[in-house]
């Protein structure tokens, strides 16, 4: 990875049973990341939205870095065609590595694993441990209940009003790319490591 090439961590579902529209959004995001020469970092899975995302990035000539715990490799869940695969010992190591490598985070629709990753990176942002963009791709208004819950947290003073700035909501993969391009962190010159706070 050179100093000017950016990397985005994408959290997303490994389920293969979700609606076709979610796959289409994941594939389109993969195409756009490849087109913009943005490295896609994720959990190295070969199924569900993660597999569709990875296949799309690779098919369109982009780069994917997968980070996966050893037990998931042993279970046969690892995508075998990624540009780079990093194997960790634990889930915790995996998540920390992903955050350290990320110039931005994008959360696609997903299950409890995706929700946990999203909640953790927002918490790190609240604590000042991660300062880069966190974008929620709200395909089919999937995250509406969660965003309403965030609003309730603010209304009942569990979060501050300013905390709403910790995440940005996008409706389409194209919106994600536009938000990245307009981010002050994204546009800042310097090496990738200088832009990390972790």
Image: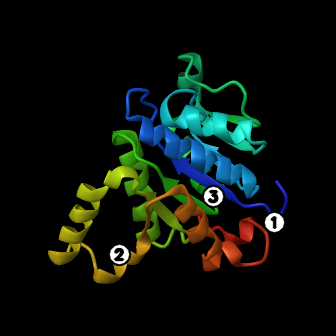
| Residue under pointer 2 | 164
Instruction: Identify the residue at horizontal 28%, vertical 80% (top origin).
Output: 160
Residue 21: % across, % down:
43, 41
Neighbours of disc 1 within 10 Å: few (<14), some (14-19), many (20+): few
All told, the count of numbered labels is 3
In the current view of this chain or complex, which residue is farthest to the left?
Answer: 156
Residue under label 3, please give it.
102
Question: In 3D space, how far apart are the residues under numbered discs 1 and 3 (Cα atoms)?
Answer: 13 Å
Q: Is 117 or 64 nearer to us in this picture?
A: 64
Give the residue at x 53% y 64%.
175
Is label 3 in a helix, a strand or a loop?
Answer: loop
Foreground: disc 1 or disc 3: 1
Q: Residues within 10 Å of mark 2 (few under 14, many from 20)?
A: few
| Label of residue 4 in the image | 1
- On the image, which quarter does residue 19 sit in? top left
User: What is the crowding at mark 3: few (fewer than 14 residues within 10 Å), some, or many (at least 20)?
Assistant: many
Residue lying furthest right in this view?
2
Q: Are marks 2 and 1 in contact (CB under 8 Å)?
A: no
The one nearer the camera, 123 or 43, is: 43
Q: CA distance from mark 2 to mark 3?
A: 21 Å
Please tell me whether mark 2 or mark 3 is closer to you in this view. 2
Residue 26 spot, x, y in % from top left = 53, 44
Instruction: Looking at the image, tell me whether mark 2 or mark 3 is earlier in sequence order.
Output: 3
Residue at the image point whose x is 70% and y is 76% from the top: 187
Q: Is residue 130 above or below residue 76?
A: below
Q: Secondary structure at mark 1?
A: loop
Q: Residue 16: give x, y in percent of width and height.
A: 44, 27
Does residue 174 show up?
A: yes
Among numbered discs 1 and 3, the one appearing first in the sequence: 1
Q: Earlier in the sequence, mark 2 or mark 1?
A: 1
Quarter-wise, where is residue 181 in the image?
bottom right
Comparing 195 with 109, the one in front is 109
């Amino acid at each position: 990875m050179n100093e000017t090439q950016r990397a985005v961590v994408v959290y997303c579902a490994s389920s293969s049973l979700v609606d076709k529209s979610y796959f289409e959004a994941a594939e389109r995001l993969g195409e756009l990341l490849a087109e913009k020469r943005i490295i896609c970092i994720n959990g190295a899975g070969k199924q569900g939205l993660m597999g569709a995302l990875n296949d799309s990035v690779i098919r369109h000539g982009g780069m994917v870095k997968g980070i996966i715990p050893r037990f998931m490799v042993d279970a046969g869940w690892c995508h075998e065609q990624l540009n780079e695969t990093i194997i960790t010992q634990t889930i915790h190591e995996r998540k920390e590595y992903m955050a350290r490598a990320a110039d931005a985070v994008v959360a696609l629709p997903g299950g409890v694993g995706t929700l946990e990753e999203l909640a953790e990176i927002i918490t790190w942002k609240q604590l000042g441990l991660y300062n880069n963009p966190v974008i929620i791709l709200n395909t089919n208004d999937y995250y509406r209940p969660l965003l309403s819950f965030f609003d309730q947290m603010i209304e009942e003073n569990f979060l501050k009003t300013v905390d709403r700035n910790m995440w940005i909501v996008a409706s389409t993969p194209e919106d994600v790319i536009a938000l990245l391009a307009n981010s002050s962190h994204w546009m800042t010159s310097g090496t990738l490591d200088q832009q990390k706070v972790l």
